[in-house]
Image (spheres, grey):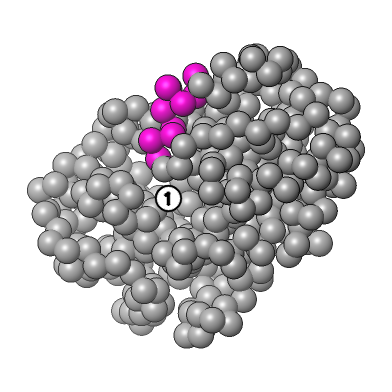
Amino acid sequence: MKTIDVKLGDRSHVIHIESGLLKRLPELLSKYNQGQKWVIVSQKSLIEKYVSVFHSNLIEDGFDSHIIEIPEGEHAKSFREYQKVVNQMMNLGCDRSTTILVFGGGVPGDLGGFVAATFMRGIDYFQIPTTLLSMVDSSIGGKTGINLDAGKNLVGSIYQPKGIFIDPEFLATLPSEEIVSGLGEILKYGAIYDKEFLSSISRGLDELESFPFSEAIKRSCEIKAEVVSEDENEKGRRRTLNFGHTVGHALEAHSGYGKIRHGEAIAYGMICSGWISNELGLLSDEETSFLKESIFKLPLPELGDLKTGSILHFIKRDKKHQSGVLHFIVLNGLGNAIISNKITEELIVNSLKEIQ
Ligand code: GLY
């Protein structure tokens, strides 16, 4: 088993990565079992496919295990669903010693993590990510939250899990768009942090059937763990993880959430950010083309007609959420991301021609 430390003082924890890990989880969790209630937060499809058996195994091994089902889809990240989960926990007799097992992708991760952060002022939780994107990104770093009508993740907290368990075998049954979405984020780690990794991912994308997922997950987790360890609260370096996200978020909002997946939108956003970096003289023509060609190896969905005005509206909204200053991430050479506060809306709009 590969283990990666997320070093955060008394909030330090370990990312465990191993194929077939799910079967060993009751054994690995047993050292945390003091007879408290365990609540698995997950969704119907995952409960049917994996959680029911996992829950039975936990019970067999002496865990007081319970399942709470939340809806599929982004709308589960609402006050209504949050309230339903905490009320069910009260009805189950949960208390401050209860431990949550978040089982699923970004939605159970964000909602279940936020419940853990707030129930009785905070209880322990573990992440068991099942999508590629949640394995390499959202399960690491403690971001939890729910949505408001005004936008995504507007209520939440940074609250670290006690551990993260990644079983790459979950990828075998994921829809291909989910894989592509996760690959978008994996390419991002190479682009912002590790040029060699970017080249090896790019080569791997030539033969997607034999793509080295376990290796790519490990390296992505190492990078994310290092960045989060250095800047948990996103005051500096953690912001570089938002490479491609200004345009990416605008594309998601413009297309309608759920129409384009997060990592797919980010992939397009990275092409725009690469072009902007090139315009600023920070990224050579050769590097810019390499980044673009590598991203376009992904079978990305068609974007359709991009309405510049609408994209700009969402970019302005993003800026508003950053106290009026857009912290835009550019590349100062491949594998080296920096933050710029000087990127104009005109430059961003001009970059859209790269993806149309
Ligand atoms: N997804 C970016 C972060 O966790 O900071």
Is 51 above or below relative to 85?
below
- The reply, left or right, for residue 336 in relation to residue 19 is left
Residue for point 39% across, 53% down: 262
Residue for point 26% across, 32% down: 320
Task: Please report the bounds of the magenta region as a residue range.
Answer: 74-83
Magenta stretch encompasses residue 97 = no
Q: Position of residue 219 (x, y in %)?
A: 64, 65
The residue carrying mark 1 has its beta carbon less than 8 Å from ligand 1: yes
The C terminus sits in image quarter: bottom left
Q: Position of residue 136 (x, y in %)?
A: 58, 56
Magenta stretch encompasses residue 75 = yes
The chief SS type of the magenta part is helix
Task: Tell which of 46 and 285 is nearer to you.
Answer: 46
- Mark 1 is surrounded, within 10 Å at the Cα level, by few (under 14), some (14 to 19) or many (20 or more) other residues, namely many
The N terminus sits in image quarter: bottom right
Is 155 above or below relative to 260?
above
Residue for point 61% across, 71% down: 213
User: Quick one: SS at disc 1?
Assistant: helix
Task: Tell which of 320 and 64 is nearer to you.
Answer: 64
Is 59 above or below relative to 86?
below
Q: Amino acid at mark 1?
A: Asn
Q: Where does label 1 land, which residue?
A: 242
Q: Looking at the image, can residue 11 be seen?
A: no
Residue for point 39% across, 31% down: 147
- The reply, left or right, for residue 196 in relation to residue 153 is right
- The reply, left or right, for residue 322 in relation to residue 212 is left
- The reply, left or right, for residue 290 in relation to residue 228 is left
Q: Position of residue 339 (x, y in %)?
A: 40, 50
Quadrant of the rendered image containing residue 120: top right
